[in-house]
Image: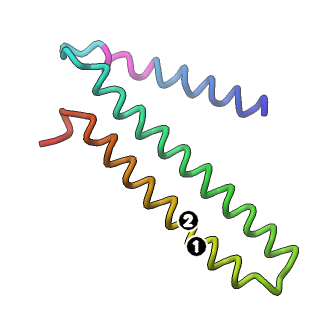
Amino acid sequence: MIRFAKIAAYSFFALMVLATPALAADTTNSFITFSGAFGAGIVCLGSAYGIGKLASSALESMARQPEVAGNVQTAMIIAAALIEGFTFFALFVCWQQNPWLVK
């Protein structure tokens, strides 16, 4: 857990350093523009973590009970599709938050 906290802290620091030119732009709503991009990044990280955890648990259960592997695999694919669907919806919402991306 400490390793995850270190990686998260370093990632946040790098994000803030790299986002400085975007926040220093000459627009009046640069924080609104930045919030959409930041939200999209959080959505992608969350969905990747969720699908990884889902696949890990499914593979572990298939290894423990090989006779139900087909049912577990079907349930895993359905759950992964639902997670991806929500991810695309959240990315669309974050995309709409950036007025300079919408044409």
Q: Residue at x 46, y 17 (%)?
A: 17
For the C terminus, the image quarter is: top left
Q: Residue furthest right?
A: 64
Q: Residue at x 68, y 64 (%)?
A: 55
Quarter residue 94 falls in: top left
Q: Main secondary structure of the magenta part?
A: helix
Quarter residue 52 falls in: bottom right
Give the residue number, with chain letter if any, for mark 1: 77
> Is 86 a magenta residue?
no
Residue type, mark 1 in image: Ile
User: Is 35 on the left-hand or right-hand side of 61?
Assistant: left
Percent across and percent down for residue 74 are 62, 79
Q: Are marks 1 and 2 in contact (CB under 8 Å)?
A: yes
Give the residue number, with chain letter if any, for mark 2: 80
Q: Range of the magenta residues?
A: 17-23
Percent across and percent down for residue 85 are 43, 61
Q: Say if 85 sits above or below 94 in the image.
A: below
* Residue at disc 2, secondary structure: helix
Q: Say if 56 sits above or below 36 in the image.
A: below
Percent across and percent down for residue 78 are 55, 72
Per the model, the C-alpha gap separating discs 1 and 2 is 5 Å
Percent across and percent down for residue 86 are 44, 55
Q: Residue furthest left?
A: 103
